[in-house]
Amino acid sequence: MADFFGQVGPIVESIDPDKPHEHPDAAKLDSITLAQFCKDKSGNELVAFLLNSSVRYLLGVEADEISALWFFAYAKAGTGLQNMMSARQGGGQYLRLHEGTQTLSRKLAAELSPKRVRLSSPVSAITHSPDGCTVTTTAGKAFRSRRVIVSIPTPLYRKIDFSPPLPATKQQLSSATFMGFFAKVTLVYSKPWWQDHGLNAIFESALGPVIYSRSTSIPSTNHWSITGFVVGEPGRRWSKLSAEDRKAAVIKQLSHGFGSHIGSEVPAPVEYVEEDWAKRAYFGGGPMPVMGPGAVTGPAKGAWAEPVGPVHFVGSETASAWRGYMEGAVRSGLRGAEEVIAGLKRQTQGGKL
């Protein structure tokens, strides 16, 4: 694996994550999948197996589904593959919010004036011109604004009726990107039985359905749980099972995995909760849109973050750094806000406000 990373490292470092299509070897790297690149450079089945496991872990897809060039640009934006997977300080898996990430949204919303945030109001259409925008919801309610920020994943752009239509590059971007399969299962227990056996609740498997797990316990509230992630092709197969069979498969796998180490039967969970992001209408999977071969150097190249008149586009996939992570999402939001402010200033100076 070290030899393979030794070959990949210089390529990743030489790529501009905002302009991967300008890399000298862009056409070649974008014409093959990451799996094919690994086969060409390594030919080692174990290396290919470990690389595919990493891709599942990070993106919920298989290495033979994504462009090698796209993946290397993604790795560069995330400060390198190994750091993206690291749970050490500064790594991509280092921090977790005990009360859930939705806490951030709720507390930010609480600082705004009442009724500024409209919930359960999906947007169906956006009409835009130099004079402003009209956003219409599926319920038929219309809102006027001078600028609009779109933050849904790129594959979902085509679910909104833009008038005038988005440029061909944005439409190509929406068509050329797709989401990986990501689901989360949480098993709640009456007590942290794993700690009694000196375990930390970390479980990893290449076969699935759970690919990896972590303790999501909150000792201060006496909440004890293990959360597993069901991703990639094993996840797709698991999702086709009935709800009862999905639950049984998860409990059986974790019971066998941990039970073989503690030498006794694993206690049954007192509660089981699953969340399949692929079934969320306004998300479609996770954790971020990916691209297959030929898409990075295709018509959509460079269109990720480009505004269209008064319409601005943000989202973790548009970030220059930590693409696909919350850090990238926040950075893209700041960039979008700066674009809006600059645009409003230009309008003011031009006497249009």
Image: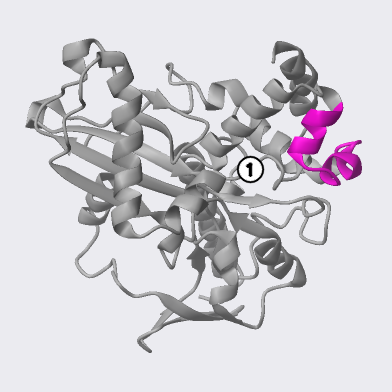
Q: Amino acid at mark 1?
A: Glu
- Image spot of residue 329 (x, y percent): 48, 45
The residue lying at 32 percent from left, 32 percent from top is 254
Count the numbered circles shown: 1
Q: Is residue 207 above or below residue 104?
A: above
Q: Badge 1 local density, few (<14 within 10 Å), some, or many (20+)?
A: many
Residue 136 visible in this rendered orientation of the protein: yes
Q: Is residue 25 above or below residue 148?
A: above
Extreme-bottom residue of the structure: 140
Q: Is residue 57 above or below residue 91?
A: below
Residue 84 or residue 209, whichever sits in front:
209
Residue 146 or residue 50, whichever sits in front:
50
Q: Which residues are magenta?
A: 23-40
Q: Is residue 229 left or right of residue 68?
A: left
The residue lying at 71 percent from left, 61 percent from top is 176
Residue 100 visible in this rendered orientation of the protein: no
Rendered-image quadrant of the N terminus: top right
Q: Is residue 290 left or right of residue 216?
A: right
Q: Is residue 33 left or right of residue 235?
A: right
Q: Is residue 232 above or below residue 24?
A: below
- Image spot of residue 154 (x, y percent): 59, 61
- Where residue 326 sits, quadrant-wise, is top left
**Mark 1 lies on residue:** 62
- Where residue 48 sits, quadrant-wise, is top right
- Image spot of residue 260 (x, y percent): 32, 19
